[in-house]
Structure formats: C-alpha cells, structure tokens
Amino acid sequence: MSDSLTDNEKIRPGLSAAVTDVSYKVRQVEAIKAGDGWEMDYRLIDQHVLIVVTAGEGALKRDGSLSRLEAENIHVCLPGEVIGMKTEAGGLELTWVGFDLFYEDETGEGCRKGTWNEPQVLPVHSLSHFSVLSEALSTYWHSADPFDRLRAQAAFLELIHSISAHMRDESPLDARSALERTRHYIENHYQTNITIDELARMAEVSPKYYGDLFKKMYGLSVIDYLTEQRVNRAKQLMALSQSRLKDIAHVVGYQDEFYFSRKFKQEVGVSPTVYMKNRRKKIAVHHSHLIGQLLAIHHLPYAAPLHPKWTGHYYENYRSDIPVHLSAYRYSEDWEHNIEKLRETKPDLILSMDTLNPGEKERLEQAGKVLYIPDRPADWREQLLLIAAYLDRTAEAETWLGKYDRRVESLRGRLRKRTGEETFLLISLHKQEIRICGTRSMGDVFFHELGMKPAFNYTRDQINVPVLPEQLAELDADHILVNVCQETETLRRWQDLQATALWRDLHAVRQNRVYEIPSDPWREYSASGHERILGEVEKLFLRK
C-alpha cells in the first residue's frame, strides 16, 4: 500500500482542526437565484465568504482569475479578496455565507480574529443535503424571531461538518485537478511547442475528452487559450522593448513571423506593426476614467490605474496591453506610490484631471510632462477633443463622436416607442445614504442624451442629490434603476430597504420595474464608458 496521501486525506485533518479549534460567527447570509446572463459586480469582501452551489453552474471571478462554480465544489473566499460571479446557460442557485472565525489565544482566556488557512476550493459529493442545510440557514437568518439567529449559527456549523464529512476523494490524477495543472503548465510554457496530445497525457485522459472538458471549464479551446497567452505576452514585449517583430514572435513561441502576424491580427484586430506604432508614445494616465478617453481615439496607455474591482472592465480586457499598472485601490491613499512609479517609468506624457491638490500637482510634474484636463465646466466631449487635439488625433475623435451620436439617436427613438411617457428614477446607495442621479454620467447619458423622462426636476447640474426613503414614494417613478456600492454595510442597507413596507409599496416595485445597475460603467465619465452605458440601457429595456 502506498504511503502517499491523496489531496482529500490531506484536507480532512485540517478541516477537523478548523472545526474544533476555532469559533465561527455568521455575519451575512444571502440566497441567490439567478437566470441566464446574470452577473454579480465585483465586491471587495471584508469577511470570509462560503459559497455553496445548490443548482446550475457558473464562474467565480476572484481577483481577476476564473474558477468554476458547481455543486461539486465548495468555495471559501478570504477577507480582502475582490470577487464576482456570473451564470452559465440554465442559471445558478447558491447560498452566500459571510462569516468571521476566531482562534483562542495561548492563555485560553480570549479570542483573536483569524484567517481560513485550509484549501479554498473543497471538492464534495453533490448531495441534496447541502441544499436542505443551506435553505435552513437562510430561513433562520432572515427570520423575524431574533432567537433564530442562534439556530442559523447552529445550521452553519452543521453545514461545515457536512462538508468535511462528504469530501470527494480527489486524487492527484483526478481529471479536473489535472486540468488545472495543465492550464498552469500552458501559462508557464506557452513559448514551447505544446500539443493537445501532450496535455491530455499529462492529465491521463483522452485528447478528445481533455479538449471538451477544457472548453467547458474555461470557455476557450486549448488552442485559443494558448494563443491568448502568447499574444498577451507579445503585446507586453511590444510596449516594453524595441525588439524586432521576428524576435518577439520567436520569444512567444512562433517560428514563422508571418503566421504570428496573422494570429495577432485575428486576436487584436490590428497588425503587430500598427499595434507597435500606436504604442511608441508612452502616455500614462493618472485617473482611471482617462483610459476610456484614450480608447476612443485608439490609443492604449502605457501606465494606468488598474484593479479587478475599481476598474474591472479595463482590468479584464486590457491588463496585458498596459505594461505598468498603477494602484486604483483607494486612490487617495496610494497617489504618492503611483507618482513614484511614474517617476521610474519616465512616460512621454501624463494625463491628469485638474482636481489635484497643490502638493500632489507639484509631485506629479516632477515625474514628467503633464496635460491637465479640466473637470468643470468642460463635459466629457470637450475633454475628449482636448486630449485628441494635443495628440494630433482630432479626426479619430470626431469620427468616434459621429458614430456615438448616431447610435444615441437610434436608441433614443426605439426607447421612446417602448417607454412612452413612463418616468425613471436613478438612485445610488452608499452606506446609509440614498442619492438621486449619483454621477454626471447617469444624467448626461440617460436623461440628457437618451431623453428618458425623469421622475424628478432634472437639470444637468442636479446630480448626487440626497433623498430620504419617504421621498421615493412622492416621486412615484414608473421605473427605478439602483446602483448599490458593493461593500458590506451598503449591501446590508439595500437588503433592509427592500424589506420595508415603504419600499414594497413603491409603484415601480409593485410593477417589477426595479433594475440593479453596476458601478462600471454607470459611474465612469468618459467616452468609452458612455458607449458601454448605451449597451447597458439597450440590454435592460430593448432586449426582452
């Protein structure tokens, strides 16, 4: 008999210690039932989160990387992580449990808050038992009887015990574990001549089964994933060096530079030569929404603030195109670090808004030449044209604006036919506050450009206006769009608000016309951000 332990045998003793040596405190329980196309905006979590899938499949986005959501895997996410979710065909049902854990101190007289130290993906047998326990936990947690919170705590402990008792025996040769290892192998050896047969042998499955399972797990074929890794690395090399195209092709695994050029254009939309030409001027942006202005004139920044939550769209789609990543997390705390990084980068030009304090402005100008973009009274169009004129790309900006305006006109006409004289209210929730039309983008695009009828006395300067819950009934909107800040206190406030009789009696709520809208793109004041808002509006009201 072999002395080696399976992954499962290594995990279970740790879980046993986790159950017996720590105390748990449930902080939040959320039962999610989502249909096709649902996506949860990125959240920065300040507590542990246990995710138990009871039906369907989807994807968990954790700090920008994807893992699979399914009944055979329990996920534990850690405080400080940024996570999001999305469904696959058929929808998804899961229970989300926020919790803290505490270790006894050495004296045994007190406790200290701790962090889950066991594996974060726990393979289990898919059992109806998990669904029953999850439903009981949610029912007790949301009960009007305060003493049922004790029963919720007990149900959570029973759920942890059930998970440890029904761990799936997952040996190192398990197909899905092997699949993940081969994915990492591709990421680390993309420059070599990798074949599907070779990867299938590593996973000890047939090439056909391997290819089918890989696409199901990651949404791309093996070849497409390998191409994506190679092209992403090539884009970084093009931005960071003056190497010849032939040399870059060889470094990323292509011996034929012409074949590489064809694959690159298929993936990126432009040839490597055009891409490199557009990257010769090293432009850094000091504020994240300026990325969206540069994209409208077909220029990618050399350095920009990127984060999977705060700049989710740009992080997911352009992180491999932008060589230098500045901090986008809690900007007011990190600006000194960002400026120091810009000093090291030596960009040709830095784009910044003119809202900096004197000390920050002085430091930024020491890092390089700065073009300041006026925040007021200039609107986003004037800001775009100012940047374009400075970079000698006015023609590109005017072409982009022409296409945008034609799309707005078409969308406005179709919306008028669909919604007629129905009124709309946009509200933002942050902590305990409710505000009407929380950003310039919401007002400029939704009301000013698309001509949607506001349920309040709207002017372009009247944004981010505080409102009391009682005033929502007075406005009597036919439709309500709600932007909820994805942090714990605000999410609890949103749950509490929805449970009130005042909210349930609102006309839009009774008509099932309340729509949650994500911060990205609705809070971004840029050309590209507004183009994405048009897509969001079309999806909400015209694709039914």
Image (spheres, rainbow, N blue to C red):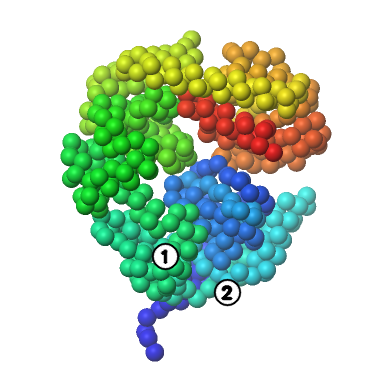
Q: Secondary structure at mark 1?
A: helix
Label 1, on which residue? 179
Residue 199, percent across and down?
Answer: 35, 66
Label 2, on which residue? 165
How far is the residue under mark 1 from the one under mark 2?
A: 25 Å
Residue 159, percent across and down?
Answer: 62, 65
* Amino acid under disc 2: Ala
Of the two numbered discs 1 and 2 in the rendering, the one whose residue sits closer to the viewer: 1
- Quadrant location, the C terminus: top right
Residue beneath the point at 54% across and 64% down: 73
Considering depth in this image, is 221 or 134 the residue closer to the camera? 221
The local crowd at label 2, few if under 14, some if 14 to 19, many if 20 or more residues have their Cα within 10 Å, is some
Question: Could you say which disc has been placed on residue 543 in the image?
Answer: none
* Amino acid under disc 1: Leu
Residue beneath the point at 36% across and 64% down: 196
The local crowd at label 1, few if under 14, some if 14 to 19, many if 20 or more residues have their Cα within 10 Å, is many
Which is nearer the N-term, disc 1 or disc 2? 2
Tell me, yes or no, if residue 9 can be seen here.
Answer: yes
Eyeballing the image, is 269 above or below 464?
Answer: below
Image side of residue 13 versus residue 354, left or right: right
Residue beneath the point at 24% across and 24% down: 348
Considering depth in this image, is 63 or 291 the residue closer to the camera? 291
Image side of residue 392 versus residue 478, left or right: left
- Quadrant location, the N terminus: bottom left
Image side of residue 137 versus residue 207, left or right: right
Quadrant in the rendering for residue 340: top left
